[in-house]
Image (cartoon, rainbow, N blue to C red):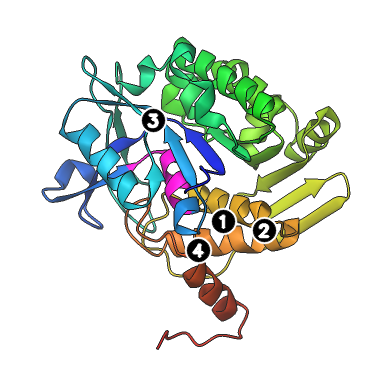
Amino acid sequence: MTNGPEVVTCGEAMLLLLAEPGVPLDRAVHFRRSVAGAESNVAVGLARLGHGVRWLGRVGADPAGEAVLRELRADCVDVAHAIVDDHAPTGLLMRDSHPRRAIDVQYYRMGSAASRLTPEQIRPEALEGVRLLHLSGITPMLSPTAAAASRRLVELAREAGAKVSFDPNVRHKLGGAAQWAQTAGPLLRDADIVLAGEEELELLTAQPADDAARELLRGGAGEVVIKRPDHSSTVLTADGGWDQSPYAVPVVDPIGAGDGFAAGYLSARLRGLHEDRALAEAACVAALVIQAATDTDGLPTAAARDRALAEFSGGGDPVYR
């Protein structure tokens, strides 16, 4: 990244303790340690796809925080502007893993270092020269100061001439529908690229998802991607709309698919590819993510993405020799 990153993300990266496959959380004895967080997942996904990425956020001065920063550095994500908090812990996430039944997710993030993010800690130089700022609705829901920091990031992105992408990533344990609409709704309307689930758009705008997408386009968004409950997706722009069906793959762990989808889509758009191709690449990355454990194990390199796309289209060898 000699010329600096082209993408900045900001959010809470947490230590993930993933229970052994198929065992309910309350019965699990063995756990695998990893790192998770919507924005850090997207950062890792984009970095593996060949983009320069910087992650902003706060971690505790503890072993979990050290692990988060080490894992991000290992994937070539720039963490030079991350803050280490001597007085608050890194958040912890525990969950189980079942391909065909409900997954139990437990968050231990109250009072975490990430929740202490403030707008004053966002330095303008962290966004100098970037092309894209990616945010999720999770960060502003952590605390009022984190919400103010998110708004500050959007202001700085505008000053830097960067586009803003936004994924609501609604987590109901962080607040009710009204709070989500009040806190995340404005960021939804400030985004150039919206990546949202159908139900998320309805929750944040109180109208059908397709109507909400058209309203966002009239309000200044350049493209709105709607992720459907059946895992298909649609992108709407002023020039039209395109649909993408999911790729049929065996599911090992469904968590992280949305972040993989975002990384795949944003990578394609950063490379100047058309929206319909971006949807295909997004669906491909999501399909690879759900075939592996943890949020990031399945995130591919650009070469692995291209091989998978060729296989999905019927034109590639399923064995890489």
What residue sits right under mark 4 in the picture?
287
The quadrant of the rendering that contains the C terminus is bottom left
Name the amino acid, label 1.
Gly
Residue 73 in percent (x, y) is at 32, 46
Residue 35: x percent and y percent? 30, 43
Three-letter residue code for mark 2: Ala
Q: Looking at the image, which residue is at 66% across and 57% down?
A: 271
Residue at which label 1 appears: 264
Marks 3 and 4, how far apart at CA: 24 Å
**Residue 233 versus residue 315: which sits nearer the camera?**
315
Residue 317 visible in rendering: yes
Residue position marked by numbered label 3 in the rendering: 12
Q: In screen coordinates, is 208 left or right of 75?
A: right
Compute the Cα span from label 2 to label 3: 26 Å
Q: Is residue 48 magenta?
A: no
Q: CA distance from mark 2 to mark 4?
A: 14 Å
Q: Which range is magenta? A: 36-45
Along the polypeptide, which appears first: circle 1 or circle 2? 1
Discs 2, 3 touching: Cβ within 8 Å? no
Rendered image quadrant of residue 179: top right
- Indicate the secondary structure of the residue bearing disc 2: helix
Nearest to viewer (mark 2 / mark 4): 2
Q: Residue furthest front?
A: 2
Q: Is residue 92 left or right of residue 117?
A: left
Residue at mark 2? 278
Q: Chief secondary structure of the magenta span?
A: helix
Residue that lies at the very extreme toward the left in this rendered image: 29
